[in-house]
Amino acid sequence: MKQVVFLLIGALAPVFGQVPSAQALPPDLVCDGSYHHRTLRHVVIPDDARCVITDSRITGNVRTTGAPRVVSITDTAVSRNIHVRNVVERVTIGAAGCRVDPVAGRNLMVRNSRNVAICEMSIANNLVVRDNRGTLMVRDNKACNNLRVVGNHVRSLRVLRNSYAGNFSVARNSWVNRGIVRDNVDLHQNPAACRRK
């Protein structure tokens, strides 16, 4: 009887095609080093790490644990959330030289970090930058919901040429040298319409 069943399956293979095999998921990464031209699933950046990811694709989330030294994610599309906090030296998220338009599929949040630069990102939901120190630049981004820059105490603050579909809030920030907030544009559309463009 077993032979008949196997013969039947073998006979039907040309009709239905090959039986699909399970596709391998991209690997998860605990990032402490430089990674280029990779496809990754989830990225965790641990305490004291220096994580640099360029020209890559992340299909899941990016998050920090502890207090990493450097987080740099450039020219890299992230399909889900980016949650970065407690970075000691530098955070750079966006495009190297601001030439292309990386995507954050859900939210981009940077909290309690130093020397933050977020440039030319398309964010499907919220862009939240709060409680940071050092220098802060948020420019030429598109947030399809809320854009909030709140509670940062920095040497200089620049929030320039961003667009948003929800609420815009730049509040409770302080700076020493210069604070520039200008040319930020309300898209006058609901978040769902913004995401379709």
Image (cartoon, grey):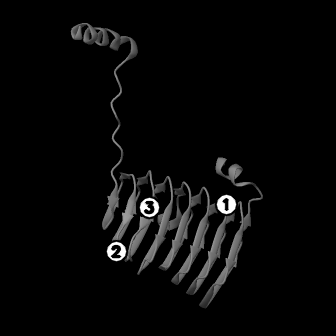
Q: Percent from the top left, x then y, of residue 115?
A: 48, 80
Q: Quadrant of residue 175?
A: bottom right
Question: Which residue is located at x 31 percent, y 13 percent?
Answer: 9
Helix, strand or loop at label 3? It is strand
Q: Amino acid at mark 2?
A: Asp
The N terminus lies in which quarter of the figure?
top left
Q: Amino acid at mark 1?
A: Asn
Q: Quadrant of residue 142?
A: bottom right
Q: Amino acid at mark 3?
A: Val
Q: CA distance from mark 1 to mark 2?
A: 31 Å
Helix, strand or loop at label 2? It is loop
Return the residue nearer the eye: 89 or 94.
89
Q: Is residue 184 visible?
A: no
From the image, tell me which residue sits under label 1: 145
Q: What is the crowding at mark 1: few (fewer than 14 residues within 10 Å), some, or many (at least 20)?
A: many
Q: Are marks 1 and 3 in contact (CB under 8 Å)?
A: no
Q: What is the crowding at mark 3: few (fewer than 14 residues within 10 Å), some, or many (at least 20)?
A: many
- Mark earlier in primary sequence (1, 2): 2
**Image vertical order of residue 68 relative to residue 26, above or below:** below
From the image, tell me which residue sits under label 3: 62
Return the residue nearer the eye: 151 or 116.
151
Q: In this image, 24 relative to 78: left or right?
A: left
Question: Which residue is located at x 33 percent, y 58 percent?
Answer: 29
From the image, tell me which residue sits under label 2: 47
Q: CA distance from mark 1 to mark 3?
A: 20 Å
**Image vertical order of residue 49 relative to residue 15, above or below:** below
Question: Which residue is located at x 47 percent, y 65 percent?
Answer: 96
Q: Are marks 2 and 3 in contact (CB under 8 Å)?
A: no
**Image vertical order of residue 3 relative to residue 72, above or below:** above
Q: Determine the residue located farthest toward the left in the rendered image.
A: 3
| Mark number displayed over residue 10 | none
Q: Determine the residue located farthest toward the bottom in the rendered image.
A: 176
